Amino acid sequence: MKKLVSIVIPAYNEADNIFVIIESIKNVFSNLNYDHEIILVDDGSADQTLEKIKEYAETSANVFFLEFSKNFGHQLAVKAGMDHAFGDCVISMDCDMQHPPDLIPEMLKKWEEGNEVVYTIREDDKSLSKSKRSSSSLFYKVLNNLSDIELEPGSADFRLLDQKVVNVFRNFHENEPFLRGLVKWLGFKQYALKYNPAARFAGKSKYTVKKMIRLALHGVTSFSIKPLYTAVYLGFILSLASVLYIPYVLYSFINNVEVSGWASVIMTIVFFGGLQLIILGIIGIYVGKMFMQTKNRPNYIIRSTNIQNK
Ligand code: UDP
Ligand code: MG
């Protein structure tokens, strides 16, 4: 019997990409000795994304859809797809053709060689905008310095997971999973493949700078409490500095040296006020996460699907 490969694709307002991505995946599999199923997760799109997928699902027995009740975000869309996949392995990829389907045969080859996770690293590509490239490299620098996991710059959500790994993931109920980090954290036998990203086929990127910052903050705070330690060390250093400053102030006071103070006092207040807010904010993020997680709400809600018995 042929092995089944599940392809999971999150789609948020990607109506113009559905046709191309499905066709190119089918094309790739026509030359491979595997069965495949394509699971498209409609992440609360406002355009014709769902209709386009349904059109396909009517005529192709191996095209499935999961419709979210609203936009839950890319990571949860991928997670939902994995939760509902039947395959011996699951490949997740974007809907916009930036993750080339042509890489699938090589991923499968590495999987057959015994790797349980085949993840991909985006080669620094000149066709990507400069701001995207520099924000992406900053993202990984911040993440690696502040958390306990090491992610290669350019790690993408384009990866193959063995069924074993997918089953482990089913037991994860984080309400904001950071898949790239989680996969690294899981262990298993991992292999990194390099690829050249293509340009987005249609539509525009849904990852705004704001979403990137959120993902970075989230990535850091889900994997370590290093930022809290940093706050403690910073507190120590500043206290020490202030102790060293005291003799100078006393000296000026005893000797009646006039110290003009207004500017320096205001600056100090503003600086330390800001610093305290940042540190409070960091603590707040952790507390907020605990709050969200303890409510134990479902991570995503499915309005409709054509996948049965799962
Ligand atoms: N996506 C999603 N929900 C969102 C944002 C994005 O499902 O809230 C999907 C999107 O349709 C695409 C993938 O996640 O398939 C990656 O998004 P995008 O291409 O916009 O990100 P970029 O490649 O620019 O980082
Ligand atoms: Mg993209």
Image: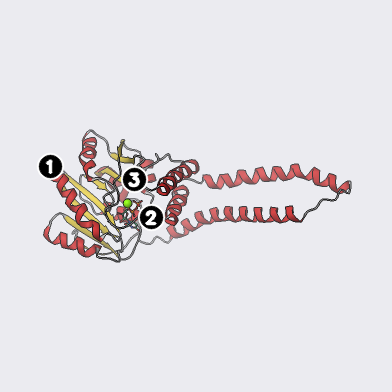
Toward the viewer: 46 or 237? 46
Asked whether the beta carbons under mark 1 and mark 2 sit within 8 Å of each other, the answer is no
Q: Which residue is mark 3?
A: 127
Q: Residue at x 20, y 60 (%)?
A: 53
Q: Which residue is mark 2?
A: 207
Distance from label 3 to label 1 (Cα)? 29 Å
- Sequence-wise, the earlier of marks 3 and 2 is 3
Q: Which residue is mark 1?
A: 31
Residue 310 in sight: no
Q: Report ligand 1 position as a quadrant.
A: bottom left
- Counting the numbered discs, the total is 3
- Sequence-wise, the earlier of marks 3 and 1 is 1
Three-letter amino acid code at the position of disc 2: Tyr
- Which quadrant would the N terminus be assigned to in this image? top left
Q: Residue at x 22, y 33 (%)?
A: 113
**In the image: residue 253, left or right of residue 29:** right
Three-letter amino acid code at the position of disc 3: Ser
Ligand 1 closer than 8 Å to label 2 CB? yes
Query: Can you name the residue that lies furthest to the right here?
Result: 255
Q: Position of residue 125 (x, y in %)?
A: 35, 42
User: Tag 2, which secondary structure?
Assistant: loop
Q: Position of residue 59 (x, y in %)?
A: 11, 59
User: Tag 3, which secondary structure?
Assistant: loop
- Which quadrant would the C terminus be assigned to in this image? bottom left
Toward the viewer: 232 or 40? 40
**In the image: residue 17, left or right of residue 260:** left
Say few, some or many: other residues with alpha carbon within 10 Å of mark 3 (under 14 / 14 to 19 / 20 or more). few
- Sequence-wise, the earlier of marks 1 and 2 is 1
